[in-house]
Amino acid sequence: MKKESLILCDTNICIYRTLALIDPPILPREELDKVLNLIADLTNNNFGCKVLVTDIILNELKDKEILFESVSDFCIRKLHWKRDSYKIQQLARKAEKSIDKFLDKRLIEDEILEKIKNYRINLPRINNFYLRYPEKLKELTANKIRYLKPFDMLKKIGSRPNTLPEENDRLLLCQAIEFSSLFEQDICIFSNDGDFKEFKNELLKELGITIIDSDYQLSQPDC
């Protein structure tokens, strides 16, 4: 990890960070604390990185349905709560109230977003990148729908044409490419999503984008 890198947060990281600060504390909280501590370490004076949120992620988090699904996914996979648990609904409401503060501090300025407004031009490149790994994509899709109800399963499959990652994940990579041409700093994406994590070596080699997840091990920053 290089000093002063620009780090684009995925939706799940914003959710984890928010849930880490909700009171009363969620238990067990190991995964949440990993995210919270890693953000603190990345932004301290030693590393001096900027953790940012793009308009793509902002729009996802403003969508109550997507926000609820993200909180629900965490509770089911990590806490083993039942999908219809009332506790999930309570957490989602708390997340709605607390996440705006994080977004206000981390949201990328409009003038920068204006400079990368044509980021969708990179989408064919991103699609072609993923389509070179059909077996890995099939496995990831199977993992994502394994515990879903039939309706939710069909919805998830519908959002992954040809088992490609959801469009917003691909568009976040498109933005990262534009950022890399705009800034001298290294560009990273902070995400716990398998569509990023399982391709981190390929994405770094082919697109120059570093993928960080909550298990990322920081060492001394590269100058």
Image: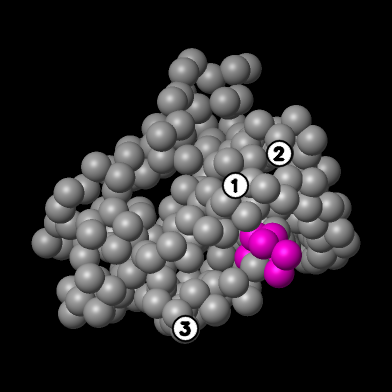
Q: Give residue 57's position: percent from left, percent from top.
A: 56, 65
The kind of secondary structure element at disc 3 is helix
Q: What residue is rendered at 83% in x and 52% in y?
A: 128
Name the residue that disc number 2 marks: 203
Outermost residue toward the left in this view: 24
Name the residue that disc number 3 marks: 151
Q: Amino acid at mark 1?
A: Phe
Residue 53 higher or lower than 110, as above or below: above
Question: What whole-number distance in Å separates the C-alpha atoms at marks 3 and 2?
Answer: 32 Å
In the picture, residue 87 is in which quadrant? bottom left
Q: Amino acid at mark 2?
A: Leu
Say whether residue 43 is magenta. Answer: no
Q: Amino acid at mark 3?
A: Phe
The kind of secondary structure element at disc 1 is helix
Q: Is residue 168 visible to the viewer in this orientation of the structure? A: no
Q: Give residue 44's position: percent from left, percent from top.
A: 42, 32
Q: What residue is rendered at 50% in x and 27% in y?
A: 47
Name the residue that disc number 1 marks: 196
- Marks 1,2: beta carbons within 8 A: yes
The kind of secondary structure element at disc 2 is helix
Q: Dividing the image into 4 quarters, which one contains the N terminus?
A: top right
Q: Is residue 214 visible to the viewer in this orientation of the structure? A: yes
| Magenta span | 161-167
Residue 118 higher or lower than 9, as above or below: below
Would you call the spot at circle 3 few (<14 residues within 10 Å), some (14-19), or many (20 or more)?
A: few
- Most foreground residue, 6 or 75: 75
Q: Nearer the viewer, mark 1 or mark 3?
A: 3
Would you call the spot at circle 1 few (<14 residues within 10 Å), some (14-19), or many (20 or more)?
A: many
